[in-house]
């Protein structure tokens, strides 16, 4: 065996020993767990974190903003906006198309979040939420629509990213991603541009 072949085999063997598999134990992250925070503090921190990534939190004194959302959606539809909803109980005026590229005309998309992170405003969405009430959903929806609306349960806010893995539930083949505010870029002259590569706005309704 040549030196090159031996080196290749040594590298592959090392990768094999270090690769994660079903039998590996999950690392102990208990030392990174956050101190317990009240729901009030978590919501306040999340609102600040969301604002830092140019998102907006909508919530009512009652703690459930679903009625506010319904009213806002009715107004958008009256204005002629194209609205598609994956949230049960929230009616849009558009059906899910067969081809994902046809979603480029959607003005507002409404989806459910699994959980959110207070420290940075990141929101976790996975296959279960994107399927919603329609099993033919295209996972590109949150990124191709003009504006994104996310419904978040106030009980599903964690303090830091260290707390996030415990909330994640992904099976083989599932899709999951963090969404932190609308699309943003500052590549050109370090000038912040919102909506260059995705949604122009993000509103989160707390329920």
Image (cartoon, rainbow, N blue to C red):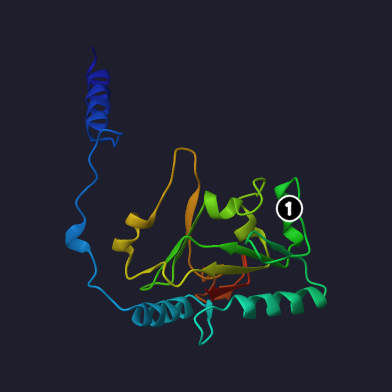
Q: Helix, strand, or loop for circle 1? A: loop
Viewer-closest of 34 and 102: 34
**Tag 1 residue:** 96
Residue 145 is situated, as x and y percent measured from the top left of the image, at: 67, 63
Q: Is residue 197 visible?
A: no
Residue 51 is situated, as x and y percent measured from the top left of the image, at: 48, 80
Residue 4 is situated, as x and y percent measured from the top left of the image, at: 26, 21
Q: Badge 1 local density, few (<14 within 10 Å), some, or many (20+)? A: some
130 vs 8, left or right, is right
Please tell me whether residue 111 is drawn above or below residue 200 in the rendered image. above
Viewer-closest of 76 and 20: 76
Residue 35 is situated, as x and y percent measured from the top left of the image, at: 22, 72
| Residue at position x 32%, y 55% in the image | 166
Viewer-closest of 9 and 49: 49
Viewer-closest of 142 and 76: 76
Q: Is residue 91 visible?
A: yes
| Residue at position x 48%, y 51% in the image | 176
Please tell me whether residue 139 is drawn above or below residue 162 in the rendered image. above
How many labels, in total?
Answer: 1
32 vs 74, left or right, is left
Among the 4 quarters of the image, the one containing residue 95: bottom right
Task: In the displayed orientation, state which residue is furthest to the bottom.
Answer: 61
Q: Quadrant of the N terminus?
A: top left
Task: In the displayed orientation, state which residue is furthest to the top.
Answer: 1
| Residue at position x 55%, y 62% in the image | 112
């Amino acid at each position: 065996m040549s030196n090159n072949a031996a080196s290749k085999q040594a590298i592959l063997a090392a990768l094999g020993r270090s690769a994660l598999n079903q039998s590996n134990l999950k690392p102990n992250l208990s030392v990174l767990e956050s101190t317990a925070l009240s729901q009030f503090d978590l919501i306040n921190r999340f609102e600040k974190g969301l604002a830092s990534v140019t998102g907006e939190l909508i919530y009512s004194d009652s703690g459930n903003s679903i009625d506010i959302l319904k009213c806002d959606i009715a107004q958008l539809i009256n204005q002629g906006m194209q609205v598609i909803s994956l949230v049960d109980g929230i009616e849009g005026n558009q059906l899910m198309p067969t081809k994902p590229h046809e979603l480029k005309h959607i003005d507002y998309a409404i989806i459910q979040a699994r959980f959110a992170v207070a420290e940075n405003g990141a929101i976790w969405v996975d296959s279960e939420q994107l399927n919603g009430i329609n099993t033919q959903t295209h996972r590109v929806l949150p990124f191709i629509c003009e504006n994104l609306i996310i419904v978040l349960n106030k009980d599903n806010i964690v303090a830091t990213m260290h707390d996030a893995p415990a909330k994640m539930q992904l099976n083989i083949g599932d899709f999951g991603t963090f969404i932190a505010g609308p699309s943003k870029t500052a590549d050109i002259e370090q000038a912040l541009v919102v909506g260059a590569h995705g949604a122009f706005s993000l509103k989160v309704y707390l329920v």
